[in-house]
Amino acid sequence: MKYLLLRNSRGSALVLNLIALAVFSLLSVLVYRTVRFQVREAVYQERLAQAHYISESGLEDALHSLYQDANWRTGFSQKAFAGGYYTVTLSTGTPPVITATGYSADIALFGRAVKTVSATAAISSSTGAATGAAYAIMADEMIEVNGPNGSVDAYDPSVSLTPASFTSTAVLWSNKDVKTTKDSSVRGNVFYFNNKSIYSGTVSGSVIKSTYTQTLPNHVCGTCSTANNNLTGITPSSCYNSGSRSLTAANGATCTMKPGVYFLHDITVNGTLNVTTTSGMATIYFDGTINTDGSCALNNLSKIPSRLLFYGEKTGGTHSFHCSAPLHAWLEEPTATFNIQSEVYGRVWGKTVKVTDSLHTDIGLQSTPSGADWSPGTWGQSYERQ
């Protein structure tokens, strides 16, 4: 009897040990699966963020192509980027709807994370010349290109945003007079309505007396006077005076502007002003003056002129550009004088335009609109596993 009890006791202990081992094994499996799931989800969330940024890069790439050709609808198929790729399609309408899908780097055994964004491109047409070209310079009264350094030419941004050579396809238009001096250079055609004073050999193309004048575009701020990015888009805050609506990049200081719409009074750049147009456009309306000195840098970080727009609303005034770094921008105010005393990529439209340095115009403007941007209210996004 004693032996039977002892055997039963040992048997029960063995059973309990087996049960405990089974429970421990089950818990180990559950913990392993939980940890594996959490690691997998962490990796997936990281890849999802990658896919999001890749999709936005595809959207930006498409917008850049639309800047160059408003009729572009080709899109991209699995274009490699950041360890993954993006595919972009465009609708056939005008303006087109852009749909960009970003695919992250591969996740072992699970494929890629996928993110899709879409936007409608808002396209505004530029005023064309008699030849269908956009203008490097439009002036209501006078264009002056003064030597020994004053020159106007053109470049192809699809070849390089910072070219080493330039073409003879610039177009200048004056509703009154045009003047060049010795040692200046205009590589292209010149239209004038009233008088010309062209120094021999300074214009490579034709000098044509027009039979009509044109109205220079006048861009008005409108509601942006109260709804703008003045307080949120300029850093540090010391660069912006909200009382006077003045932006000042002081000597030795660096100020930054995000993409957006601004309504400013005076703009003074003695130090460095960086405009982060790599992620969008910056449209700057101003009703004062723009002043720069020789040691400054007004940097359009994308180097695409049509992403940095200066629209003046003041009657009269003089705006001077004299930075040591090149400026990539469109400068427009139909009643103002623009003094181009340093290298500018883009275009200048004003009452009087004086060029004593180099003005390079984008030949992509000759048959394309003046830019594309995301339209308000059209942003959409979705994501799924793949």
Image (cartoon, helix red, strand yellow):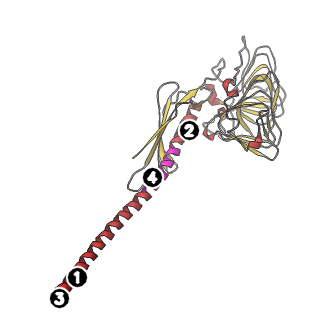
Measured Cα–Cα span from mark 1 to mark 3: 10 Å
Q: Position of residue 11 (x, y in %)?
A: 21, 80
**Relative side of 327 to 71, left or right:** right
The span shown in magenta is 40-54
Measured Cα–Cα span from mark 2 to mark 4: 24 Å
Cβ atoms at labels 2 and 4 below 8 Å apart: no
Mark earlier in primary sequence (2, 4): 4
Q: Position of residue 12 (x, y in %)?
A: 23, 78
SS assignment at label 4: helix
What's the amino acid at mark 1? Ser
Q: Position of residue 383 (x, y in %)?
A: 44, 42
Measured Cα–Cα span from mark 1 to mark 4: 52 Å
**What secondary structure do most residues of the magenta stretch adopt?**
helix
Q: Residue at x 38, y 53 (%)?
A: 110
Q: Position of residue 326 (x, y in %)?
A: 74, 39
Few, some or many residues within 10 Å of mark 2 (<14, 14–19, 20+): some
Q: Residue at x 39, y 60 (%)?
A: 34
Residue 3 numbered tag: 3
Quadrant that contains the N terminus: bottom left
Measured Cα–Cα span from mark 2 to mark 3: 85 Å
Measured Cα–Cα span from mark 4 to mark 3: 61 Å
Residue 44 numbered tag: 4
What's the amino acid at mark 2? Glu
